[in-house]
Image (cartoon, rainbow, N blue to C red):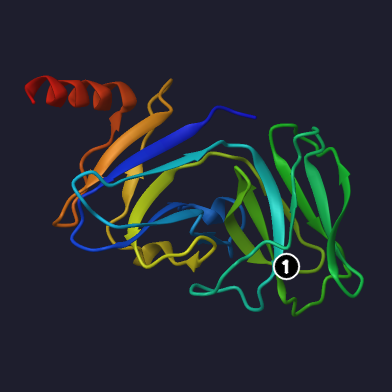
Amino acid sequence: MGKKYSVTVNNRASHSAFFMVFQNDPTSWSPNALSLAWFAKYSNPSKTARVKFEWTVDTGFSWAETGELKPGIQFAATETYDPSSGLNKITLDYNGAYQFVDPTSGADKDRFYLAETKNIPLKSQAAVGVTMSGSTVYAVQARPNQNLTFSPHPEYFIAYGDYMEGDVIDVSTVNNPLRLEYPTGVYALTTTLNVNGSWDDPVTLAQSNQKLLQLLEAA
């Protein structure tokens, strides 16, 4: 398991909604791929309300019978594949039902490979996804004889609104997302969503703790 990243959000918003963490470069995997609401948690705002997300960059694959993949639908993984054994290539097959088969080693140990056999229906009702920390990040419609390669270079964002984990989203329509930039050696960030919908610049855990101590000393 890789290093654990986290973001803690102080919720001072004007209304209750979902915090949603996503990544926004699906075409780095496939030209027709779409982003998903990677993680989501419902939150009621208050002076003390906080929400925390944690994840690792452990990468794998998933598939789900979604029908036509487009923004607004749900992707709920039927099967996932974890390549932690070093077998970084998996194949999606169809024999009346979809299934992952034949785990093996891809050409480059730092990449992840997903092949789809000729048996996948031309108008497939399934979609395949890239997972990170066990949840699907990106998805694309399954197609016969498709070969996909993924190199992890994650960029993280958080937003607030009407989102559920697994929602297929159009990242261009996400309202006021905040980019979460982790400097080298930093794995925990804290930010605040304010009543006017603005975000505070993310700070490191050390900076956040220093502010908390100053507030306690001033009390």
Q: Secondary structure at mark 1?
A: loop
The residue at the point 13 percent across, 26 percent down is 215
80 vs 142, nearest the viewer: 80
Q: Position of residue 70 (x, y in %)?
A: 54, 74
Residue named by callout 1:
142
Q: Is residue 125 left or right of residue 95?
A: left
Q: Is residue 219 left or right of residue 182?
A: left
113 vs 36, nearest the viewer: 36
Q: Is residue 5 left or right of residue 141?
A: left
Q: Quadrant of the C terminus?
A: top left
The residue at the point 51 percent across, 66 percent down is 167
Q: In this view, which residue lies farthest toward the front? A: 219
Decide: is 165 above or below 109.
below
Q: Position of residue 159 (x, y in %)?
A: 34, 55
Decide: is 172 above or below 195.
below
Quadrant assignment, res 112:
top right
Q: Position of residue 1 (x, y in %)?
A: 65, 30
Decide: is 98 above or below 113.
below
Quadrant assignment, res 20:
bottom left
Mark 1, residues whose alpha carbon is within 10 Å: few (<14), some, or many (≥20)? many
The residue at the point 20 percent across, 51 percent down is 12
Decide: is 141 above or below 206.
below
Q: Position of residue 68 (x, y in %)?
A: 63, 78
Task: Inspect the image, locate mark 1, and give the three-letter code of the amino acid beneath it.
Answer: Ala
Quadrant assignment, res 41:
bottom left
